[in-house]
Image: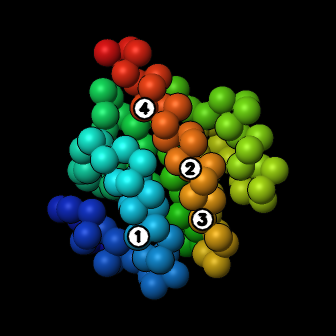
Amino acid sequence: MEKPTDVNQYILQASEEAQVIMKELRSIIQTAVPKAEERIAWNVPNYTLNGVLTGFAVYAKHVSIGFSEGGLSEEERSLFETNGFKTGKGTVQIKFGQEVPSKIIKQVLFRHAQLNAAKS
C-alpha cells in the first residue's frame, strides 16, 4: 500500500470488501462526532476531538477500529464481544463480510468524546 496523503486515498487503496467497511466507519464517525478532525496519522485514518478520538486500519482479513488513548472499558469490550467481535485493549476487529456494529460504535464514540472533553 502506497503511503496515503488523505483518507480517500487510504480507502481506495484497499480491497473492495475493506472499502465497504471503512466507508461505513467513516460515515458513522462523521455523523456521530461531526466536529472531529479527519487526518492521516501513523499512516492510517485518524480522528481527533480534544485529543485522539478514533481511527481505523485495514488488515488482510479485517478492518480494525481503535478508540482514544485510554482504550475500551470492560463494559465497551463486552458489548462488542457479545455481538461476535474480537477486541483488544482499545480496538475492535470487523471481519470482511461482518456487519458493522454502528449503534455500538456510535455509543462508544459519544463516551470517548465526553472523556476527551473532560480532559481538556
Q: Residues within 10 Å of mark 1 (few under 14, many from 20)?
A: some
Q: Earlier in the sequence, mark 2 or mark 1?
A: 1
Residue extending farthest left: 5
Alpha carbon separation for disc pair 3 and 1 = 11 Å
Disc 3 marks which residue? 100
Residue extending farthest right: 82
Q: Considering depth in this image, is 21 or 27 the residue closer to the camera?
A: 27
Helix, strand or loop for disc 3: loop
Q: Residues within 10 Å of mark 2 (few under 14, many from 20)?
A: many
Task: State the mark number for residue 113.
Answer: 4
Disc 2 marks which residue? 105
Residue at 45% x, 26% y is 114
Alpha carbon separation for disc pair 2 and 4 = 12 Å
Q: Quadrant of the C terminus?
A: top left
Q: Amino acid at mark 4?
A: Ala
Q: Would you say 31 lies left or right of 67 here?
A: left
Helix, strand or loop for disc 4: helix
One can see residue 3 in this view: no
Q: Amino acid at mark 3?
A: Val
Q: Considering depth in this image, is 54 or 35 the residue closer to the camera?
A: 35
Q: Would you say 83 lies left or right of 15 here?
A: right
Q: Quadrant of the N terminus?
A: bottom left
Helix, strand or loop for disc 1: helix
Helix, strand or loop for disc 2: helix
Disc 1 marks which residue? 23
Q: Are marks 3 and 2 in contact (CB under 8 Å)?
A: yes
Residue at 49% x, 37% y is 110
Alpha carbon separation for disc pair 4 and 1 = 21 Å
Q: Earlier in the sequence, mark 4 or mark 1?
A: 1
